[in-house]
Amino acid sequence: MSALPTIPRISLTWLLVAQALVILPLLAHLPLWILALWLGCAGWRVQIFRMRAAFPTAWAKGGLMIAAGLGVYFSRGSLVGLDAGVVLLVAAFLLKLLEMRSRRDALVLIFLGFFVVVTGYLFDDSILVALFSLLPVTALLAALIGLQQSAIAQRPWPTARLAGSLVLQAVPLMVLLFIFFPRFGPLWSLPGPNDKGVTGLADSMAPADIADLSRSGALAFRAQFEGEVPARSELYWRALTLERFDGRRWSQSSLAQSPQTAQWQAAGESLRYSVVMQPSGQPWLFSLDVARTSLDSTRLMADFRLQRNRPVDRSLLYGVESWPQAVREPQLDAARRAVTLQLPADGDPRTREWAAQLKREHPHSEQLVQALLRHFNQQPFSYTLRPPRLGRDSIDGFLFDTRSGFCAHYAGAMTFVLRAAGIPARVVAGYQGGEFNPAGNYLQVRQFDAHAWVEYWRPQIGWTRVDPTFQVAPERIEQGLEQALSDEQSFLEDSPFSPLRYRQFAWLNQLRLGWDNLNYGWQRWVLGYQGTQQLELLQRWFGQLDGRLLALVLVGGGGLLLGALALWLFKPWQRERDPQQRLFRQFARLLARQGVHWQAGEGARAYAARAAGLLPAQAAAIEAFADLYEARRYAGEAIADAQLWRQLRLLRRALPWRLRVADKRTQ
Amino acid sequence: MNRRWRPHWDRWLARRIPASGSVRLTQRRIFIVPSRVGGAFMIALGLMLLAGINYQNSLAYGLTFLLASVFVVAILHTYRNLAGLTLKAGGTTPVFVGEAGRWRVRLESSGRAHQAIALGWLPADLQSVDIAEQGSVTCELNAPTTRRGWLRPGRLRVESRFPLGVLVAWSWVDLDQPLLVYPRPLPGELPLHAGADQQSPEQGRLAHGQGADDFQGLKAYQPGDSRRRLDWKAYSRGQGLQVKDFASYSGLELDLDFEALDGDIETRLSRLCHWVLMLSERQQSFALRLPGLYRAAASGDAHRDACLQALALYGSPP
C-alpha cells in the first residue's frame, strides 16, 4: 500500500458528504436515533480532524456498538431480517467513520457506502431515487480518488469533477452491460422489506377500508391494451372475491385457498393487455374477467382471480389475455354453493324478512336482481364517502335507515339480500375504471379507483356481474370517483397538494400525465427488465439467441466503446502530426529492436552511421533509408512518403528477427 | 519472482525498456494490472450483483454495472496518468559507504498533469510526486549504500494508482545513473610511503606520531585564514570565530601508500580515504599510491575527487 497511512483531507471531506447523501434517501425507512447517531459521529470525526478530540477508545467503540445493536433491536423488534439488517448496516457505516484511521478503514467505509446505496434501492426504486443515487456514488468515488491523491492536493472540487467524469464515461458501458448481461432467477429467497405503508386491497373488507383507500391517490397499477381500450364501464379489475360474511366484515372464504381449477369456457372476443403492478404485498394480480396470463408461478383460481405463489413485493409486469364474455362455472358444486349462500346465524332480521318477501314476489333470480337494482335506483339512496355510523345490524341500518354509503355498502347489502333469498352471490373486490394517459396510451389505476361489486350465480349461465353502485351513482362508474363526489368535495381531501386534485388546469395535467408516462417507461423498461423481458427484447433484435452470441456482443461492444473512449481521451491525432517524424520514429524502432537505440539529440545521419557500423550486413539498407530521409526532409526534394515507407519495408525485411546486438556487446 | 525466471525477465525488460538517461513512458513500457484494492472492489461488486440477482432489483444491477464500468474506464485513466511522462537522470552526488545514496530524477510532463506518481526502489517505500501540466519536478531518491564502487540501484519502479487505486500501472526504468560510493573514512595513523625518499623507519614512526596528534587546538580567526577550518560548533556556542589549528606537514613530502598499511583491503582503503579528506581539508599536497596506480602529489578538490574515485574503484574491473 502507499506510504502515507493517514486519510487525506479531500478524502475525508468527500466521505462526510457521501455519508450524508447516502443516508438522506433512506431516512424515511430508518429509526430516528440513526439521525442522532449520524450527527454525533460526523461531528466527532470533524473534531478529530481538527485535533480537538481524540479517537474513541476501545471501550467507547464497544459501548457504541452495543448501543446501536440494542437500538436496532428495540426499534425493529429483531436483529435479523432485511429491515433490521439495513439499520445495522447503516449504523456500521456511521460508526466506521468514527474509528477510521487508516486508508484500509476508509476503503471499508467506501464499500459499505455502496452497499447502503444498494439497500436503499430495495425500499424505493423510483426514477428520482435512481438519479439521486448518482450523487452519493460520485461522492464515494471522489473519496476513493482522494485516498490516492498526494497530500499536496487541497481543493476538493477537482476531485469530485474527476469522479463525475469517470461516472459519465462509464455510462455507455453500463448501458451495454445492463441490456446484455444475462439475468438469473433468485439464487435463494431473501426476506423483502416489510412494506407496512403500502396501501391496497386486503383479504377482508369492512366498508371503512374501501373508504380509506378512496382517500389515497397512490398508483395501484398501469395497464396497456393492444388495440382499443374498452369502455370505462367495462373495466372491472378483479383482485379477489369475498365470500364469507360474519355480520360485519366480508372476507375470503377458506375455499378460495384450496387449489381448484376454474371452470369456464372462452367465448367472444378476447382482450390482450399488459399490466405493470406496483408492489402490493399481496399475492393476487389484477385482471379483467376471465384472464389467462403467461407469467410463471401464477394460476387462475376457482373464483377466477389470478394468484401468484408469493406476494408482489416489487413492481411486476405481466401480460394477460381476457375473455369478458366467457361462461364461468355453469355447474356449481355443493361446497361452492354452500359458501356462496353462507350468512351469519342471526342478525339483520329486517333484511332477511324483506329478502323473503322479494323472493315470493320474484321467483326468478333475474327478476329479483332487477327489482333490487330498481329499489336502489328509485329509493332515496345516496353515494358518499362520509356515511353515518351504523349500529349492530349494519345491513338493516344501511338499507332501511341511513341509506347512504359507497360501493362496499351497496355490494355487501346486495349480496346479503341475494343470499337471504337463496341466490348464490359474492362480493368481488378490485378496481374499477382508471385514467387514460394519452401520452403513453395506457390506463393508470389508482387506489381511489378501488371498488366492490357483486356476482350472482344462475344455473347454466354461471356467474354474472352486477354493480349496485351504478344504480346510485352512475357517474362513479362512467366518469370516476372525483365526479361522483363533486357535490361533497371529499375527493382526496386529505392530500391538498396531490396533483390529481388539480386536473382542471390543463398544463398541470399535461405535466402530470407526462411525468406518469416517464415513470411507466421506467417501470416497464428499467425496473421490469428481468428474465423474460430481456429475452423478448434480445430475441427481437438478434433472433435466435445463445450464450456465445451474448458473450460476443458484450465483449465486442465493450471493446468498441472502450476504444472510442480511449480515442477521445488520448487524441492520438494530436500527438504526431508530422508524417516524416513518424517515419523516423518507425525507423528508430526497427533499429532499436536490434539493440541500436536512438539517443536524444542525435541526427539522422549520425544515427544511421552508428547503426550501419553495428549492423554491417544491413548497412546498405540503413544508409539507403537515411539518404532518402535526409533528401526529403532537409534538402526538400520531392520524394513521396510512400517511397520512404517502401524503403523502410525493405529495411525491415533485411533485418533479422531480433538479433541481439546489444547483448553481444555487453558480454 | 521465481529465481529461475529472473534472468529471462531481466533480459526481456532490458530489451523492452533499454537503459537510457531519458526514458519516455509509452504504451510499450507501461504495465497495468488490478491492485489488491481492485480485488476487494471486485469482491464487493460480486456481492452487490448477488443482491441484485436475489432481489431481482434492476437498480442494484445498474449500480453494479456502473461501478464495473468505472473500473474498466479507470484502466484508461490509470494508464494515462503514467503515459507521456519522461524520466531523466538528474545526476548524483558521490557519498561515503554508510551514507544514504542520493539520485536526482527529473520528471517531465509533455502535456497533461500527472498526479501521485510514485517512484523508488522496491521493497523500500516509494516517493510520491505530482507533476503539473507541461511542468517538471526533480525529486531526490535515497537508497542505502553498503559497499564502495559504482552503485547501480537496479531498475527504478515508477508507478501510479491514480485515480481510483483499483489498478496499478507501472514501469521499470533504468536511467543508467550509477552512483559513486567512496570508502568509509576511518581515522588512523598516517600511512606514508617508505622508500621512495629513502626515509628511515624511525622517521616513519615519527611521522605516524605526528599524525596521531595533528589537531593542535583552536586559535582566534585572522583574516586570511581558510574558512574551511572555521570551528562552527564553537561559534554556535558563542565562543567567537575560531579556527582549527593543525600541525603542519609542509616540511614533509606526503606520499600516502596502500602498502604502508596492515589489515584487509577495505580497512586500508578506509584509512587512506580518511587521510585524503584530512589533507585536502588542510590544502596539503599529497600523492597517493595504490597497487598499480600512482597519483602524483597535488592538492585541490579535483585531486581529492580523483583520489577518492581511485579508492572507490580500487579492485573493480575498469
Image: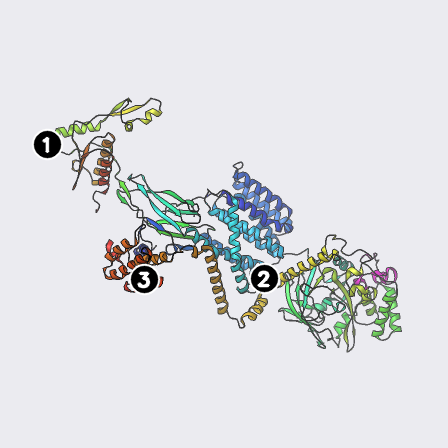
Label 3 close to label 2 by CB (< 8 Å): no
Image location (x, y in percent) of residue A377: 86, 66
**Tag 3: amino acid:** Leu
Of the numbered discs in the image, which one, if any, rests on residue A648?
3
Q: Does the stretch in magenta take in A525?
A: no
Q: Residues within 10 Å of mark 3 (few under 14, many from 20)?
A: many
Image location (x, y in percent) of residue A550: 50, 67
Image location (x, y in percent) of residue B135: 41, 45
Does residue A253 appear anywhere in the picture? no
Label 1 close to label 2 by CB (< 8 Å): no
Q: Is residue A462 left or right of residue B267?
A: right
Asked which secondary structure carries label 2, the reply is: loop
- Residue A521 occupies quadrant: bottom right
Residue that carries the numbered disc 2 in the rendered image: B56
Of the numbered discs in the image, which one, if any, rests on residue B198?
1
Q: CA distance from mark 1 to mark 3?
A: 71 Å
Q: Residues within 10 Å of mark 1 (few under 14, many from 20)?
A: few
Asked which secondary structure carries label 3, the reply is: helix
Q: Mark 3 vs mark 2: give the one in front.
A: 3
- Between A389 and A6, the residue placed more toward the observer is A6
Badges 3 and 2, same chain? no
- Work out which quarter of the rendered image holds the C terminus of chain A and state it: bottom left
Badges 1 and 3, same chain? no
